[in-house]
Amino acid sequence: MSAALAANPVPATTRMRRIAALLERGFAFDTPGNVFRATAAIMLVGGIASLLLGQDANWDLRNYHLYNGYALLHGRLLQDLAPAQMQSYFSPLLDVFHYLLMARLPAPLAGFALGALHALVFLPVAGIAWLALHGQPRRTRLVPLLALAGLCTSAFLSEFGSSMADNTTALFVVAALYMVLLAQRQQAAGARRAEFLAWAVAGTLLGIAVALKLTNAIYAVALGLAAVCVGGPWWRRLAGVGVLTLAALVVAAALAGGWYLRVWQAFGNPLFPQFNALFQGPLAAPISVADVRWLPRDAWEHLTWPLQFAAAPRRVSEVRLVQLVWPLLYVAALALLLRQSVRRTVAVPAFAPAMRVVLVFFGIGYVLWQGLFSIHRYLVVLELLAPLVLWFLCQRLLPGGRAAKVGGWVLGIVAVASLLGWNTWGHERWARQGFSVEAPPMPAPERSVVLLVGGDPQAWRLPWLPGQARYAGVATSFPESPGYRAYLAAIVEEREQRFAMIPAAMGEDDARWARLNRWAQVFGLTRGRGCDRLRSLAGKARGLRAEVEVLDPGQCRLGPRRGTAPEPAEASAQLRELARQQLTGYGLVLDEGSCVTLDSRIGQGRYPYQWCRVGLAR
């Protein structure tokens, strides 16, 4: 029989059809069991992908995500003074979750859980597509594919498995949109009790999202306006939006109101130190802290912004996020407007009213994002829905079978581009414990103050340092006022033992070079003519910062490029000198002779720091 099979192999196209049929039987959204199976599979893949990425080590985690959660749980609002720079006073609700997850569980388990949680957004995205594509052919097959395409977008992928809040809070925003669509369907059917419950659940989810991250307020506005587009009579629609708004306000106030009230009582500004031009809190400069560097600069950029930041991703992000979905949406929307202006239509199946709601939410959300932030990672919610919107535009622009075929290819290309350009905000190799900090010499913590000097993120170490000490930031991004400096001086005067925490330069990682040389050996690049190819590779790969070292005739290896950066000891001395100058401005003297370099790690990544005594200037 095997000989017969070998003589008549199954064609590749037939095998592909069989695989597609198997996937459709198991994951098409035609039974509740398949919905559960597809969601569970995506969550499993999400957990594994998070493990493959490694330990989260992004800048915000090192600055305030760990510290803020720890500080709230241990009541450090008045004990410390802005050790996590201006972000020390952001609402810490979600950071409590991150701190408990990352500090209390084995690091790989925490990473798997976070990846699975982020992947769970597949379910509400699929629910939105299910309602928006009501009456469309092949809906059961399209819905999971469109939801999966939403997860394969650049902003979502960049934060996957990390503590950056946009992916986590997107789950609540997208679920709120799904509940609004359900409420509108119940509203049109006249089912008042189910309608009220759906509006209330939508408002609850939206309130949670805003309480966890204030930037989600743009999506709250967009959802409120979109909610009046579809449903029963106008008064029923407005009543539903009223329930949505009331529930969102009550939940947001219940979750975050206590924090903002405490910060207001302590510092005279509930959003301290932001918007201090309005609130005039005494410890911050009377300015409104806003990051406007990402915004479009002129009218032309405003009109063509999706094309602008697709061509130059760093216009809207510190990390280069490659994507094609926004320029394609822009071009397709313009083409559709042009077609409608000349009254040329294409016969397409009528879309459900829910699609109108999705389009209004998407459009208003984008306009608010561009006008207020233009920070790419705040687009996670819209990028999750972008494949659905792009599919709709393809159906309106192209006739019949061509629309489905072209739409499928376009979405596939968009997903592949984002996956190939996948970039993140920083990861390290796993260790069982996510964080470790070598204990500094601090003989009397209850009589000590520790100054975190400079703008590098250092507060992540504080949960592993003595809790009796007071910690304060100096020369950071915090907009200090004379009142801040006076308060800091009082803390320093009160405590007899004074220390400074200063970043230390990291030496080249021997393990990294050993790993690179093992791969070079596998590919035959460490002997003979392979050394010439290795030299060519080292010269072309600018980010590698490597040169080829000759060991014996005909044998070579990669090593760190000489002269490209100061030696660690020299670089650390430069950091101490900068800290000495910064402390001088506060009437403090750095005792450089007392400085020691200590180890601290995130996963297997080293983040050493310097620990020095500080004295008062005479």
Image: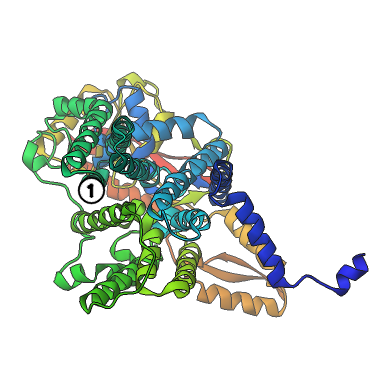
Look at the image and tell me in which quarter the N terminus lies: bottom right
Quarter-of-image position of residue 236 = top left
Question: Residue at (29%, 47%) from the top-left corner?
Answer: 455
Question: Residue at (35%, 55%) from the top-left corner?
Answer: 352
Q: How is the image coloured?
A: rainbow
Q: Position of residue 582 (x, y in %)?
A: 23, 45
Look at the image and tell me in which quarter the C terminus lies: top left
Q: Position of residue 380 (x, y in %)?
A: 36, 52
Question: Is 340 drawn above or below residue 122 in the view shown?
Answer: below
Q: Amino acid at mark 1?
A: Ile
| Helix, strand or loop at mark 1 | helix
Question: Residue at (66%, 65%) from the top-left corner?
Answer: 17
- Left or right: 525, with 236 as reference point: right
Judge by depth and name the residue closer to the eye, 490 or 278. 278
Q: Is residue 606 visible?
A: no
Q: Position of residue 522 (x, y in %)?
A: 71, 66
Q: How many marks?
A: 1
Q: Is residue 106 visible?
A: yes
Question: Is 210 drawn above or below residue 10 in the view shown?
Answer: above
Q: Position of residue 41 (x, y in %)?
A: 58, 46
Question: Is 478 drawn above or below residue 253 in the view shown?
Answer: below
**Mark 1 burial class by Cα count in 10 Å: few <14, some 14-19, many 20+:** some
Judge by depth and name the residue closer to the eye, 372 or 232. 232
Q: Which residue is mark 1?
A: 218
Quarter-of-image position of residue 595 = top left
- Left or right: 573, with 402 as reference point: left
Question: Residue at (39%, 54%) from the top-left corner?
Answer: 384
- Left or right: 192, with 264 as reference point: right
- Left or right: 102, with 328 as reference point: right
